Image (spheres, grey):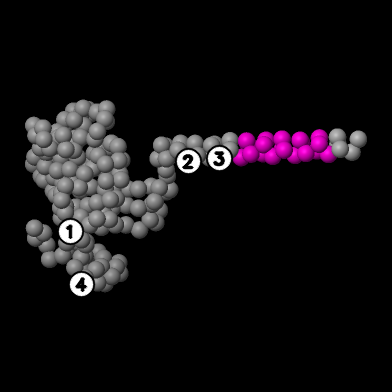
Amino acid sequence: MNAHAFTSDVAFTPTVKAIQARKGSRQSYARVEERGGWQADITPDLAAFIEMQTSVFLSTANRDGQPYIQHRGGPAGFLKVLDQHTIGFADFSGNRQFITQGNLTDNPQAFLFLIDYAHRQRIKIWGTARVVENDAELMARLMPQDYKARPEQVILFTVSAWDSNCPQHIPQRFEAADVAAALGERDKRIERLEQEIARLKGISGAAAGAGATAGE
């Protein structure tokens, strides 16, 4: 349950609101608060966006407030929406520093940052997270099928608020696999057109030859 007056208060602290007031944006954000603030439930559209991603940034902080950002990646669908408030994913074995796990042990507050460069869209998700070890059933549910990685544990993220950003300043980039697929389709189209041109030239040449024979 969100203990703030508005869901956006997870980010808009009194200090942040004072700065917004000083710099002229408080009124517009106050109107958002009047409408209930940011959403706390995972909507169908958000769920679809989450499960399309192949990359996510997970932010945590230790007991002293020192922040840390960890990248997590996998095939589309490696991030799974388990219910209206929970996102889960298999945490694959990496450099085994366990900074994220240590931070979450001392401080469960966490943040997910998702960015879709192709569509120039980003989503910010606030909440809490915890590590689940030795749960074979949950791991089997979250482990991407046929993905060549060794799962270490599971991370469950509980959503308290989320917001989307405008596309301003997001460079448009495309996944290598998507570019390769598009180029493959282009090459097939070029091949078909070249074959059609050769066929038409053959018909034209045959017609010209027939015409010359008839005129002799």
Query: Which residue is labeled 3 in the image?
Result: 189
Q: The disc labelled 3 sits on which kind of residue?
A: Arg
Crowd band around label 4 with a 10 angstrom C-alpha radius: few (<14), some (14–19), many (20+):
few
Q: The disc labelled 1 sits on which kind of residue?
A: Ala
Position of residue 89 measured from the top left corner of the image (x, y, whole percent): 19, 40
Q: The disc labelled 2 sits on which kind of residue?
A: Ala
Query: Which residue is labeled 4 in the image?
Result: 34
> Mark number for residue 182?
2
Give the alpha-carbon distance from disc 2 to disc 3, as whole Å.
11 Å
Dominant SS in magenta: helix
Task: Name the quadrant of the C terminus.
Answer: top right
Queried whether the magenta region covers residue 210, the answer comes back as: yes
Give the extent of the magenta segment. Answer: 193-211
Kindly indicate the quadrant of the structure image that contains residue 155: top left
Give the alpha-carbon distance from disc 2 to disc 4, as whole Å.
45 Å
Crowd band around label 2 with a 10 angstrom C-alpha radius: few (<14), some (14–19), many (20+):
few
Give the alpha-carbon distance from disc 3 to disc 4, as whole Å.
54 Å
**Residue visible at 24% across and 51% down in the picture:** 47
> Mark number for residue 40?
1
Callout in the foreground (3, 1)? 3
> Pointers 2 and 1 in contact (CB under 8 A)?
no
Callout in the foreground (3, 4)? 3
Residue placed furthest toward the right:
216
